[in-house]
Image: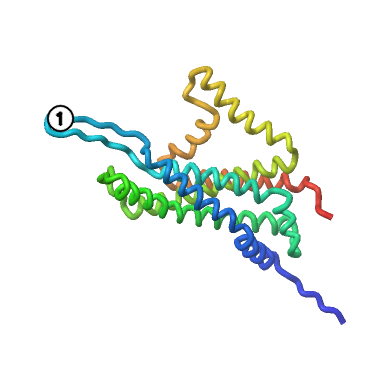
Amino acid sequence: MMSLTKVSLGEIVKKQVHFKLKSYRGMFTSLMVLQIIGILFSFGGEGGGGGSTENFSYDMKYYSGNIILAFMLIWAFISAIVVTTQAYRFDDYTFVANRLSSHLSNILFLSLASVIGGTTFLLANQSLKLSVLFLQDREFIERQPLTLLQMGEGFVATILYLFLFTALGYFFGMLVQRNKIFIIIIPALLFGSLFINVFLASESTFVIDVGQIFVRETSFLMFVLKVLFSSILAYGIAIWISNSLEVRK
């Protein structure tokens, strides 16, 4: 007599996520490398000024983690694209899996990667401050001390930005898997809009206008809702696109 063991979807997804955390360690190595590069680029500051009197002179530079965050957003976008490639998708067939469990495990893995990225960003940001203090012999003055609530909101916002970029990368990756022509079309549209606006001497571009929807939001709750809605929409469309991809035999 033969007995069949029914494996739940949750157990399959859990095993796949655990497998990906162990197998995709290179993504986190590249994250650390990009953070170090971001810190090095940030040494020059993001602006500044200076002045002098009869008795003394001074120069002032502004430092922030914006450059580090920019590198991390690129990392999140590219990492999500890599996860959608055929070689990575075939790794899921090591398990008794289907498309749904594969997508859910990918989204959970990228969510965990976003949390790890947000946490390490705080460490990288503090490393930048310490490096400026000790290596450049400067006195670091914060514009306004952050409250615990503001620090918490900044931490959550960083994770959400990373999560949003993983969703966009996942969507773009699935488009490319659907048709390779999107490798040319989407960058052409993005960079084309930038060149057109530069030619027309306009400060507004499609990319900037879309980005302002999130950046200029003053309500933290609305910001969270916008990011989650946009991310769920991007992931949802990516899953819908994947249904038309060929099934591995």
Rendered-image quadrant of the N terminus: bottom right
- Outermost residue, left side: 55
Q: Relative to residue 206, is residue 184 drawn left or right?
A: right
Q: Please determine whether, in this image, residue 198 is positioned above or below residue 48.
A: above
- Residue drawn where x is 50% and y is 56% of the image: 115
Task: Please state which of residues 199 and 100 is positioned toward the viewer in this rendering.
Answer: 199
Q: Relative to residue 115, is residue 44 drawn left or right?
A: left
Q: What type is the residue that disc 1 sits on?
A: Thr
- Outermost residue, bottom side: 1
Residue 68: x, y in percent? 45, 45
Q: Relative to residue 159, is residue 178 drawn left or right?
A: right
- The residue that mark 1 highlights is 53
- Residue drawn where x is 81% and y is 53% of the image: 248
Residue 127: x, y in percent? 38, 52
Q: Please determine whether, in this image, residue 204 is positioned above or below residue 37.
A: above
Q: Secondary structure at mark 1?
A: loop
Q: Please determine whether, in this image, residue 84 is positioned above or below residue 93.
A: above
* Residue 21 visible (yes or no): yes
Q: Quadrant of residue 112?
A: bottom right
* Residue 141 visible (yes or no): no
Task: Please state which of residues 92 and 149 is positioned toward the viewer in this rendering.
Answer: 92
- Residue drawn where x is 28% and y is 32% of the image: 49
Q: Quadrant of residue 185?
A: top right
Q: Relative to residue 211, is residue 178 drawn left or right?
A: right
Rendered-image quadrant of the C terminus: bottom right
Residue 35: x, y in percent? 47, 49
Q: Please determine whether, in this image, residue 236 is positioned above or below residue 115.
A: above
- Residue drawn where x is 55% and y is 26% of the image: 194
Residue 205: x, y in percent? 52, 27
Total number of numbered discs in the rendering: 1
User: Within 10 Å of the Cα at label 1, are there few (<14), some (14-19), or many (20+) other Cα atoms?
Assistant: few
